[in-house]
Amino acid sequence: MTTKKNSPSISKVSLFHKFFELIRKIKPNLVPWSIQSLDPSQSYLSFTYSDIKMAATEYKRVWNILLENYFVGWICNDSSYEMFRLEKN
């Protein structure tokens, strides 16, 4: 069981929290277009980490270049580990 006390400070969950903190502080017209393209009728909390990651098209493009050219031996986890949502505080 992961709790705030024993969870690492850099993790997918902590980065996801930081992402939403930033999104809440940015003016809506300055939110990246790939994130704006998500269904606006849904709360951001309804999206999974994977949903947001897949919407980040520039991130995916650069990450694929890194994997192909520099991180050839990188072990990728099963995508099911990215299907989590944040809980409402």
Image (cartoon, rainbow, N blue to C red):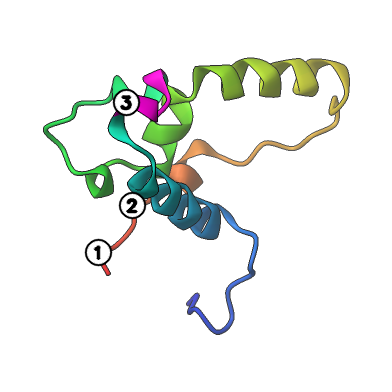
Confirm or deny contact between disc 2 and disc 1 (CB under 8 A): no
Range drawn in magenta: 29-33
Residue 67's place in the image compared with 12, above or below, is above
The local secondary structure at tag 3 comes to helix
Q: Determine whether label 2 and label 3 are within 8 Å by CB.
A: no
Say what amino acid the circle numbered 3 marks: Asn
- Callout 1–callout 3 Cβ contact below 8 Å: no
Q: Describe the element under mark 2 as helix, strand or loop.
A: loop
Q: Position of residue 1 (x, y in %)?
A: 48, 77
Residue at image coords 29%, 32%: 28
The answer to whether residue 12 is magenta is: no
Tag 1: Cα neighbours inside 10 Å, few (<14), some, or many (≥20)? few
x and y percentages locating residue 88 in the rendered image: 24, 64
Q: Earlier in the sequence, mark 2 or mark 3?
A: 3
Query: Around disc 3, counting alpha carbons within 10 Å, would you say few (fewer than 14), some (14 to 19), or many (20 or more)?
Result: few
Could you tell me how far apart the alpha carbons at marks 2 and 3 are, in whole angstroms? 24 Å
